[in-house]
Structure formats: C-alpha cells, structure tokens
Image (cartoon, rainbow, N blue to C red):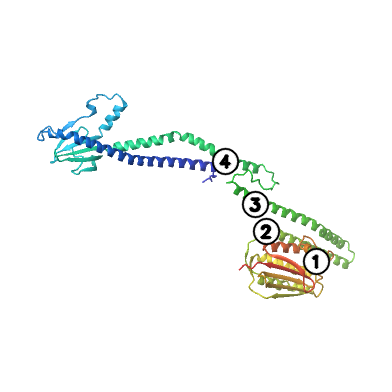
Amino acid sequence: MPYRKPSIYKFLLVGLLSFTFAYFSITYWVSQKQAVHEIEELFDAQLLHSANILFNLLGESVSTIDQDSKHLPVVYHGLESMVAEPSSRTEKNALRYQRKLAYQIFNPDGKLLIKSNSAPDEPLGTQKIGISRITLSDHVWRVVTYYDEDWQFWLHVAESESIREELADEIAKQTLLPGLIGLPIMLLIMMFIIQRGMNPLKSLASMISQRDPKNLQPIDLAKAPKEVRPVVWAINSLLMRLHDAIAREQRLTADAAHELRTPLAVVMLHAQNALAAQEESQRTDSLKELEQGIMRIRRLLEQLLTLSKVNPETIPRIRVNLADIGRNVVAEMAPMVYEQDHEIEWVNEDLDLWINGSDFLLEILIRNLIDNGVMYSPKKGLIRVTTVKNAAGFLELVVEDSGAGVEEEQLSKLTDRFFRVHQGEGKGAGLGLSLVKSIVEFHGGQLVFTRSDLGGLRVSVAFPDEK
C-alpha cells in the first residue's frame, strides 16, 4: 500500500467536522429526551385536567342512559362532525391530534356505555384509579382512570403517546435546524481559521527552505508561535550540533594540512637523499630517517582521526573498571617502555573503581599519557601509573614521569593542539595531551597538571564516582 503523508490541515478539518457532527447528534438526542420529559409532565397535567372536566360533565349523561339498550355504546363525535373539510393548517392539526385523544365510560359490570369516536371498544384502562400506560394493537396510550361512586361508572381518558413523541421530535428538530442550516457556513469558517492557523508553519517552512546551506545560525524564535517553538528549538539544537560538527571537521582538516606539510617535506627530503646517496651507509641512514618520518605521520593521522571520533553522541558508554584498564594498558606497553631504556610502574590501592565510560577511549588516554612520559624522560627514566580513589571521593588516574618537567607558565598550554614544550625534542606532533583533554571532557572528568615528586610532569585525571 502506498504511504499516505499525514496532514495537520486534513486532521484538524476532519476532526472538527466529526466533533461538530457528534455535538449536533448528542444535542438532538439530549433535546429529544429533555423535551419528552417536559412534555410528559405537561401532557399528564392536561390529561388530568381534561379527565376532571369529563368526569364532572358526563355524570348526568350516564344517569339517562338505558344500560340494557342494544344501541350502546353512545359515540360522541368531535370536530370532524362539524367541519366537512379543514380550511386551515390549524384545523388540520387539531383534527390530527383529536384522533389521538379518546375517552370511555364503563358500568361496574364492564359494559361500555359511552365513548369517543377515536376510542377502541376494548377498555383503555383497568378498574384502578390513577394514571397508567396500556398497549392496544401496538398502540401505546397514556390513561387516566376515575370511578364515580354516586353514578357508579368508570371513566377512562386516554391520549396516544405518539402525540408526545411527535411533539418532542418536532421540538428537537427545531432546536437542531438552525445549526444544520449554519453548518456549511461553519465549515467555511473552520477552513479559514485552520488555514490562518497554519500560516506560521508555512512561513517557517518557507524561511527554512530559502536559507543558504551554509547558514547554520539559529532560527529566530520571536516570530514563532508558542506551539511551534519546541520544533524550532529542536531544529536550532540540530543546527548547533551540525555547526559544531562541521567546525570540528574543518578544524581537523586545517590542522592536518598544517601539521602534515612539514613531515611530508622531511619525508620527501630523506627519500631524495636515499636515492642520491653514493654509499650504502648514507642510504641506510636516509632510509632510517625516512622510516621515522613515516611513523610520525602515521601517529599524527591516528591521533587526528581519534580526535574526530570523540563525540558523546556516537560513542556508547558502558560500566568499566578504571583499575583493570590501567593495569592492562601498563602490561601491554611495558615491553615498548623497557625497549627504550625506561622503567614503568603501576600502583593501585583500590580494585573497585567503576565508572560509566568508554574503555576504548580510556585506553587511548592512558597510552597517550605514558607515551608523553616516555617521550620526554631521559634514559633510565621512570613512568608511574597510579589508580586510586582520592580523599574527595573521585576516582583518580595519575601518570608521572622523571623528565625535565614543565614551567609553571606553560602548564595551561599543554592541551593546545600542536604545542610542544621542547620543540626540538621528542617525535610527537603535539596532539597527545589535546586528545587526552577531549577524552576527559567526554567522561566529565577533571584534568590537572602539576610537578611530580619524580621531577617531571604529573598528570592527574579525576572521574566522578558512579556506583
């Protein structure tokens, strides 16, 4: 089945029309029920009044009737006997309603003495005084019954309930009719109101569609209706994230282009020297320098790619043990550290150091700190890695080295990209500590640089305890 695009306009229009139809239907039903109730009370009162009049008027007539006559019952005709042809609507309605009114008089033995021409021969009521309801030949009558003890007769005055139902329907229809007549006008008004209400959405869509692709500035909320603002806020948030992502990519590209220019020139120079070398020893030295230059470029690219991936929205967080990660990285890097004539030491005071984070990024963080210590430590230097829960309740990772250390005024620049304390020393690109800073921020930690008791740099990373 083809997918149907949802439409707010159609939804509102159909919803309002359905509500209006349901409202009129319920109004008609309630009006009809309320009218029937009121008519019941009014017509019962009139029926009692008519019964009282007939009860008082027909008493003497009963006394003059020969109850043994073969011409009983006596039939009294109404308006139709005096009007041959109704000449007005009033007369027509009167005749129609008169046929639905009836009365009967029975003697105590149940013999019908007098009746209206609209009454059946069967008794309309029982020998029980009061108001009752009876069904004769699928016709429902409302009956008032009286008994005259002086003249000894039963009077039944009845009214067809169809009169009440017709009148109630007529009242309900008259109540509903103005609304039905005005329904087309209401439909046009609703369409106009909905279209006007949709104009802010259309304006917003037009404004967004006409934007320059490079324009990632937030959308102005001043002109946005209150109901649309959550959508605009979400769009603005997306634009901000997109702006940050593009800026990060542009910065990464610019940094890579800037920093790769020199290593590539050096690699090219060593390659040319190797090709032009007349002696094998010169060629070997040039190739070694070429290898080191390529390794530096590879390390630079790896760090740049890692920096571009440190994004809280794309990297999942899991429950990890900082002590286990520290121990594993130290064990993994120990052979490389020993090969460069250094010592590495792991100190742990607490094995229960759990945080919510990325084990992949934490491993990169610890490796970079160890690499930094190895790079700037003299021969026979010591790199110490400590994982501990400090006095403030934070889970702390500390990496120290026995190198030359860093001057106090330069500590704040250590995390700047491509900044190296000793520009002539080491083989790094100046991205290691910048990458460490990004990973620490990803985990909501704190990064502090101080001088170590070993003589070199002390790097402390404190993570919140998330038990």
Circle 2 or circle 3, nearest the eye: 3
Cα gap from disc 4 to disc 2, whole angstroms: 38 Å
Q: Which residue is mark 4?
A: 198
Q: Which residue is mark 1?
A: 408
Vertical relation: 183 (above or below) 230: above
Mark 2 crowdedness (10 Å alpha carbons): few <14, some 14-19, many ≥20? some
Cα gap from disc 2 to disc 1, whole angstroms: 31 Å
Q: Which residue is mark 2?
A: 311
Give the quadrant of the C terminus: bottom right
Mark 3 crowdedness (10 Å alpha carbons): few <14, some 14-19, many ≥20? some
Circle 4 or circle 2, nearest the eye: 4
Element under disc 4: helix
Q: Amino acid at mark 4?
A: Met
Cα gap from disc 1 to disc 4, whole angstroms: 62 Å
Element under disc 3: helix
Q: Amino acid at mark 1?
A: Glu
Say whether residue 81 is left or right of residue 223: left
Q: Which residue is mark 3?
A: 237
Camera-nearest residue between 467 and 337: 467
Cα gap from disc 1 to disc 3, whole angstroms: 39 Å
